[in-house]
Amino acid sequence: MLNEALQNVTVIGASGKMGSGIALLLLQEMTRLDLEQGFKEVASQKQLNLVDRNQEALDGLKAYLSKQLTRYAEKVLKADAALTDLFVQKGLTIANFTLELESAKNSKMVFEAIFERLDIKTKLLLDLKEICSEETNFFSNTSSIPISVVEKEAGVEGRLIGFHFYNPPAVQKLVELISSDSTPQALQDMSMELGQRLRKVMVPSNDIAGFIGNGHFIRDGLYAISQIEELSKKVEPNEALYQINRITQDFMVRPMGIFQLIDYVGLDVFQMILNTMNTYIEDEELSSDMINMMIDQGVSGGQFHDGSQKDGFLKYENHKPVATYSLKEKKYIRFDEGDWTEKCDQELGNFSEKHFPWKALSRDAEKDVKLSTYFQSLFEMDSKGAKLAQAYLLNSKKISENLVKNSVAAHSEDVGKVLMNGFFHLYAPENEMY
């Protein structure tokens, strides 16, 4: 069933950050299938329609795919020079770079990687429903909007599934698979098989706004913001921001602080997901005045086209944070302005001697043992930094418990899989370490 569906596939928004990664993964698999069947010529019966609105962007996509197909053939398939060249030629023959949505007419699988807005997704699916056959299934990269809402608005019940890649799709291992009550088992099974072929860690999530990944991330961020507000009663807001960001990276052994992560995603995207979740989740107030005020002041985070970080909660130079934003003063206060960061570090206190940074542990075969020893020592300390970290870790655990309690995740292990594969955490929020 899947091999037949992979004869003709379409990606909408193919030149974007998410779309280009999805396009690459599908093109690699479709070309690999031809190779598996022993291709001896460039021509192929398969077609991957890569649809976007800008021809220049499509030209850039073609160059990107050519380069990445070469790397895939050499590193994954271990192909020699001649076979690598044929593989790339074959792949570029399969790829159909086009501005025309109508190219999806004969596709059995259509992936959308467009802006996270219900009206835009609905309009696209309504157009596709008129173009494609009734046998076409649609795969949405939605990160927060419930599938049941989208399919009902577009009238494609039973033909839509959430296939949430993490950014960047070609690198990130995780895919959240979101099914509604009307999603057929056959579509779920085919989606699971496709994800496995793309070498992804597939985690099913129930169809509740935000799903597992953003369900934890958004609440994790809101807790951090509440801690800034609490600490700001005793220290300057920029100092509170600095301390919480340091707690969530260094004391909690994460790859980056929570405010760096929000900056990476984008404050505007955080706000959009927050608003979506608040719209569809009852009995929980999900909002942030601080996020709204920062966006009103023109602070949005996110990335530039070259992948470099835009300023958000923190200001960045040479890929490193150098200042924190002060809402009160409406400006960034640099780390090297006076000795305020040293004062903050002294207030937090020193690490336990059992501490190792995330980078050192990320490839350590004994990381679980070392983390367990570290967290045991952390929970025996009573410094300001240790107390803040303890409370934050326990809140993260509570978020995970509620995701299971509210049937977003089937098991706590699924929450752990999402955070460890999608956010590069070294441990699950529910564990026996603390």
Image (cartoon, rainbow, N blue to C red):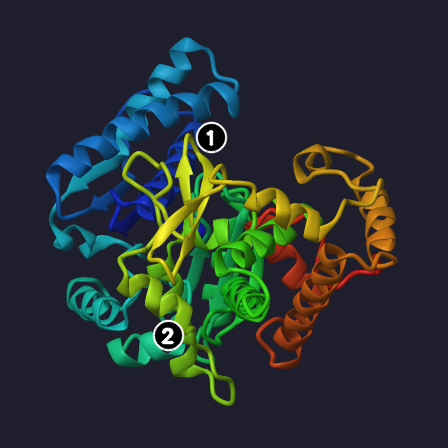
Which element carries disc 1, helix, strand or loop?
helix
Q: Sort mark 2 into few (<14), some (14-19) or many (20+) by Cα contacts within 10 Å.
A: some
- Is 365 on the left-hand or right-hand side of 15? right
Residue 136 visible to the viewer:
no
Q: Nearer the viewer, residue 51 or 413?
A: 413
Q: Nearer the viewer, residue 180 or 336?
A: 336
- Is 78 situated left or right of 428 in this image? left
Task: Judge whether 263 appears above or below 221 on screen.
Answer: above
Q: Amino acid at mark 2?
A: Asn
In the picture as drawn, the residue positioned furthest to the top comes out as 81
In screen coordinates, is 209 left or right of 122?
right
Residue 50 x, y percent position in the rendering: 23, 44
Q: Quadrant of residue 137?
A: bottom left
**Chain-order first, disc 2 or disc 1:** 1
Residue 275: give its label.
2
> Residue at 79% of width from left, 40% of height from top?
367
- Find numbered disc 2 in the image and state the secondary structure of the residue it sits on: helix
The quarter of the rendered structure image containing the C terminus is: bottom right
Nearer to the camera, 297 or 93: 297
Q: Which mark is residue 52?
A: none
**Residue 376 at least partly seen:** yes
Amino acid at pointer 1: Glu
Residue on which disc 1 sits: 36
Percent across and percent down for residue 56 are 13, 35
Query: How far across and how far down the image is residue 148, in percent?
Result: 39, 78
Residue found 56% across the figure and 64% down from its top? 224
